[in-house]
Amino acid sequence: MNEKKVYADEFQTTFVSAKEMLDFLAERTKTSEWLCKPTKALRLAALEKEREKIEPDDPGVLSDTEKNTQLVLKVAGKTYPVRNCAIAGTAGDDPCPGAPALSGKNKC
């Protein structure tokens, strides 16, 4: 397996084995957090007005946001950069075309 995937937000990685891919996914699962909030609690704002409220773990996230969407998501008193990969979901489009729909118990 020597596939390379490049995503809309310019993140990319290469796996040389199935085990390497599964280890990567397991680590992502451990370090990921999903927030489930009602749509009416979400606010999009211009990055330039909210820049001082953002402390990304990776400075590349902020530069990618500046270059692409220039938007932040405000929810529950926190501000998050909005990258290209989030736009489809925010717009109500299917962010993962072809993927099976989530069952009711797995939806937020």
Image: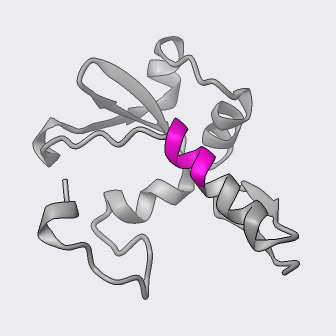
Q: Which residues are magenta?
A: 26-31
Residue at 56 percent across and 17 percent down: it is: 55
Q: Is residue 70 above or below residue 54?
A: below
Q: Specify whether 32 is left or right of 62.
A: left
Q: In the depicted view, which residue is nearer to us: 19 or 35?
A: 19
Q: Specify whether 74 is left or right of 76.
A: right
Which residue reaches farthest front? 19
Identify the image quadrant of residue 50.
top left
Q: In the depicted view, which residue is nearer to us: 37 or 72?
A: 37
Q: Is residue 12 above or below residue 16?
A: above
Identify the image quadrant of residue 13.
bottom right
Image quarter (top left, top right, bottom left or bottom right) of the N terminus: bottom right
Residue at 20 percent across and 61 percent down: it is: 107
Is residue 29 magenta-colored? yes
Identify the image quadrant of residue 92.
bottom left
Specify the principal SS of the magenta part.
Answer: helix
Colour mode?
A: one colour
Residue at 64 percent across and 37 percent down: it is: 66
Q: Specify whether 101 is left or right of 69.
A: left
Residue 85 image position (x, y, % from top left): 53, 58
Residue 48 image position (x, y, % from top left): 52, 25
Q: In the depicted view, which residue is nearer to us: 26 or 43?
A: 26
